[in-house]
Image (cartoon, rainbow, N blue to C red):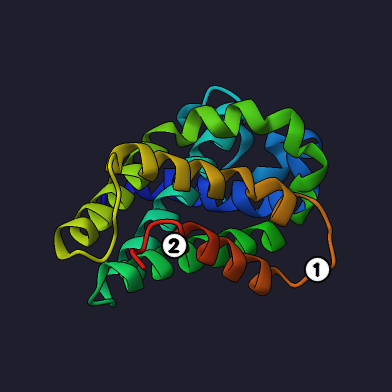
Amino acid sequence: MDNHELTKQEIIKAASLAFSKFGYKKTTLDDISAFTKVSKTGIYYYFKNKEEVFQAVIKVEAEKLQNNLREAINQEATPINRLFAYVYARMQYLEKISNFYSALKNDLFEQLNVINANRKEFDNIEIEVLSQILKEGVDRGDFFIEDVEEISYVIFTTLKSLEIPLFGIDNDFDKKQFIDNIIKLCLYGIIPR
């Protein structure tokens, strides 16, 4: 990695810290600069504005999520266990970053369009991963699914729709039990009896 890329990564890491501390609205480029050795002018060399820096932070987090998912899935031998691992790894990672970015919760609904737009390519990768797991499960006879792509999209959309209720707002229910119930709901509808 060259110096240019290292500096850019340093800015993104600093921005992540600033956004987690102050939230999106209150964070300024001066705040980001304070978390790094790069001046505000230096940040402008790499990014046009705060929104572009925020987009880079989202992209980095999405890449980290993808890596976590791959690692969790690759540790399992069967499609059923890979599907469980996928859901647990996804939700645990999102819970971890939601705690880290707790200051962003106030800005979450306003920034949702920016977040969703920047996650689109990663969402498509997740749907493809789910499709591969489900297709292997169908081929092995573990799952009975008529349209793998459609069910992959349904599972992904279900999990994505739970992000804000589970992690975007403060609540006091047992998230692990909730996630277990979601997995059971998804699986027992597709495992032959």
Q: Nearer the viewer, residue 184 or 73?
A: 184
Q: Is 101 on the left or on the right of 58, as rendered?
A: right
Say which quarter of the image contains residue 150. top left
In terms of secondary structure, where does tag 1 sit?
loop
User: Within 10 Å of the Cα at label 2, are there few (<14), some (14-19), or many (20+) other Cα atoms?
Assistant: some
Q: Is residue 142 above or below residue 26?
A: below
Mark 2 or 1: in front is: 2
- Which residue, given by chain and number where applicable, does mark 2 sit on? 187
The structure residue drawn at horizontal position 49% and vertical position 38%, both measured from the top left corner, is 56
- Which residue, given by chain and number where applicable, does mark 1 sit on? 173
Query: In terms of sequence position, does the residue under pointer 2 or pointer 1 come before the other?
Result: 1
The structure residue drawn at horizontal position 43% and vertical position 43%, both measured from the top left corner, is 8
Q: Is residue 125 above or below residue 182?
A: above
The structure residue drawn at horizontal position 71% and vertical position 55%, both measured from the top left corner, is 167
Query: Residue 5 location, x and y as percent?
Result: 34, 44
How many angstroms separate mark 2 from mark 1 (CA)?
Answer: 22 Å
Query: Residue 166 location, x and y as percent?
Result: 71, 56
| The furthest residue to the top | 48
Q: Is 94 on the left or on the right of 63, as rendered?
A: right
Report the quarter where the C terminus lies.
bottom left
| The furthest residue to the left | 139
| The furthest residue to the front | 193
Residue 139 visible here: yes
Q: Is 114 on the left or on the right of 135, as rendered?
A: right
Say which quarter of the image contains residue 170. bottom right
In terms of secondary structure, where does tag 2 sit?
helix
Q: Is residue 8 above or below residue 42?
A: below
Q: Is residue 26 above or below residue 1?
A: above
The structure residue drawn at horizontal position 29% and vertical position 60%, both measured from the top left corner, is 143
